[in-house]
Image (cartoon, helix red, strand yellow):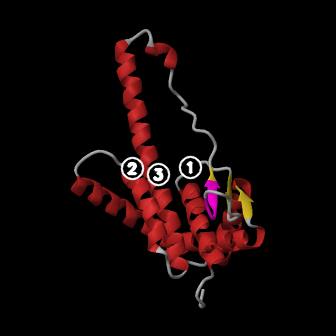
Amino acid sequence: MGKKPSKIEKIAYHEAGHAVACHLLRRAFTRVSIIPDDDSLGRVEYPKIRVKGLDFEKLDEDPVEQLLIREKLEKRLERRKEKEILISFSGVIGEKNCGRHNWRRASRYINTAIDLHEAGSDEETNAYLNWLWWRAVGMITNPYNWELVTAVGNELLIKKELSCRNVKKIIKTITMAIYRCGKLLT
């Protein structure tokens, strides 16, 4: 984008950053929208979280199984938190990468990340969140992934709302176009 992006363009790229990060991190979502509501200027909506592959019937029977299930849940929760932080940061990066960014609004996402990572000292939390920030920057600004953010953002500007299926179609179309052209985005 050569010109200064409008407010709606920044919102579209912000939400596209979240949606592409969801796709890359295999986080289910139902739709992405830039239609404002009472709570936000745009949003990615998620289905309810289900826990798969755990046998809760064994919880009552075996204390060892209880520990194993608790350990599995804690590991899944830690991975989920990390994904949520990366996805949260990806919206800010999508908006920032398309032009100027309002860092005051970004503080909401940083506070969410701090709330999700509640363990350790302040220094440890800062180092961990800084590491996740740079992972998200690398993920979203990678030239191939930025093409995806741009395509989803531009489609959001036209349609205002996209289902997960629509986002996946856009991503598949861009991926196939890049593959057919042999275009290397490095």
First in sequence: mark 3 vs mark 1: 1
Q: Residue furthest bottom?
A: 2
| Label 3 secondary element | helix
Q: Amino acid at mark 2?
A: Asp
Which picture quadrant has residue 130?
bottom left
**Residue 126 place in picture, x, y as percent:** 28, 59
Q: Are marks 3 and 1 in contact (CB under 8 Å)?
A: yes
User: For this view, does 61 lie left or right of residue 11?
Assistant: left
Q: Residue at x 61, y 70 (%)?
A: 11
Q: Is residue 185 visible?
A: no
Q: CA distance from mark 3 to mark 1?
A: 8 Å
Image mark for residue 125? none
The quarter of the rendered structure image containing the N terminus is bottom right
Which picture quadrant has residue 14?
bottom right
Q: Tell me the mark number nearer the camera, choosing from 2 and 3.
A: 2
Judging by the rendered image, the residue that carries numbered circle 3 is 83
| Label 1 secondary element | loop
First in sequence: mark 2 vs mark 3: 3
Judging by the rendered image, the residue that carries numbered circle 2 is 115
Q: Residue at x 51, y 14 (%)?
A: 57
Q: Amino acid at mark 3?
A: Lys
Residue 97 versus residue 126 in the image, above or below: below
Q: Which residues are magenta?
A: 40-44
Q: Is residue 43 magenta?
A: yes
Q: Residue at x 51, y 20 (%)?
A: 55
**Residue 138 place in picture, x, y as percent:** 43, 69
| Label 2 secondary element | helix
In the image, 136 versus 119, the foreground residue is 119
Q: Residue furthest right?
A: 159
Judging by the rendered image, the residue that carries numbered circle 1 is 27
Q: Is residue 131 magenta?
A: no
